[in-house]
Image (tube, helix red, strand yellow):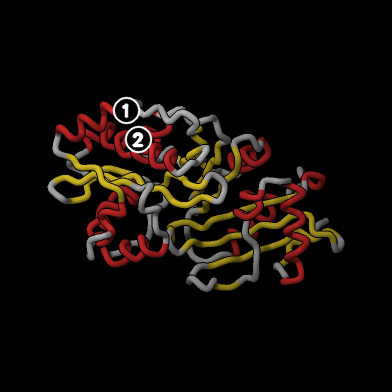
Amino acid sequence: MAQIRDYRPEDAPTLQDLLRQIWGQDTWTVQYYRFGASAPTAQGGFLRTLVADEGGTLVGFGSAWTNPFHPHALYVGINVHPRFGRRGLGTRLLMALAQRSPGRLPLQGSTWEHSESGMRFARRHGFTEVRRTWEPELPLGDPQEDLHADCESRCAALGYAIVPLADLQAASDGLRQLAPLLAEVYTATHGPNPPRTMDADGWTDLLRRDPPDPEASFIALRHGRPVAMSAAHPDPDAGLILSWRGVAAGHRAHERDLILALTRRQVLAAHRRGLPALKGEFDSTDPWAMIQMEAFPFRPAPCWVTFRRAP
């Protein structure tokens, strides 16, 4: 019977190889699942890893970690080699992690929808689905310049001005002007797992530490104040990925036109840059992301499903 024990530094190469055996060439998933020494992380979070050791062979592991930016959940990841599945190792790892982790935070885990074993494991252990995430690509061979041009015309008629983020950055306090809008829309789209509480300085610092592309991110201004946004960040595969977006309260009667007008500008900017496609990161908990994904001809993409369970 496999022994559940604490992670040791010398386990790292074996666990990395185990992830590759389970997930193959899916480098994103391999990188998602963390493991390491049981100690606070440099960013003030927590990480603990337990391994399933069967006679000196590591056949599975589980990790629990916190995210300082999203501190209201304990993230968990369980991986067991398929040849050693259906022996209760995943259950034992999950129970041991829950018992040995700090506080009483909800447990949060994710897996691919096409992973029947992962979906079944989550539901069998009392997890409830809270979010679905897609990262599809929009081909840019023909940007369809007229697509949603009517949305931009209606926004202009209502007094909205659409400008690239670069224009806002040119002002000495431009990012600070954008910070309240980012705080509002980011919090609104992360209801199941909200970000930590931050003041305007904190959100301004986030814009500096994780800067959107200034020429491919667009802001809607009303009377000179940011009221809607759609950001894009650099992406190692597609070049750009649609990321933060949203509309301030008080302007949501026009949210569809605003989001589509902003996204249209992003599509045209990516096309001018010569990119073959524009990627999007779309959460089911984000109504503005759903507008983007449904209104533009994105290709189908796999679905990453996030689950939660009460502590």
Q: Residue at x 54, y 30 (%)?
A: 300
Is the residue 87 above or below the residue 169 in the image?
A: above
Residue 122 image offset from top left, x and y in percent: 60, 43
Q: Earlier in the sequence, mark 1 or mark 2?
A: 1
Real-space Cα distance between discs 1 and 2? 7 Å
Residue 304 occupies quadrant: top right
Q: Amino acid at mark 1?
A: His
Residue 168 image offset from top left, x and y in percent: 25, 55
Picture quarter with the N terminus: bottom right
Residue 129 visible, this angle: no
Quick one: 122 or 152, which is closer to the camera?
A: 152
Is residue 140 rendered to the left or right of residue 186? right
Q: Amino acid at mark 2?
A: Arg
* SS label for mark 1: loop
The crowding category of the residue bearing disc 2, from other C-alpha atoms within 10 Å (few below 14, some 14 to 19, many at least 20), is: many
The crowding category of the residue bearing disc 1, from other C-alpha atoms within 10 Å (few below 14, some 14 to 19, many at least 20), is: some
* Mark linked to residue 275: none
Quick one: 155 or 276, which is closer to the camera?
A: 276
Q: Residue at x 68, y 50 (%)?
A: 91
- Write down the residue under mark 2: 264
- Write down the residue under mark 1: 148
Residue 94 image offset from top left, x and y in percent: 64, 54
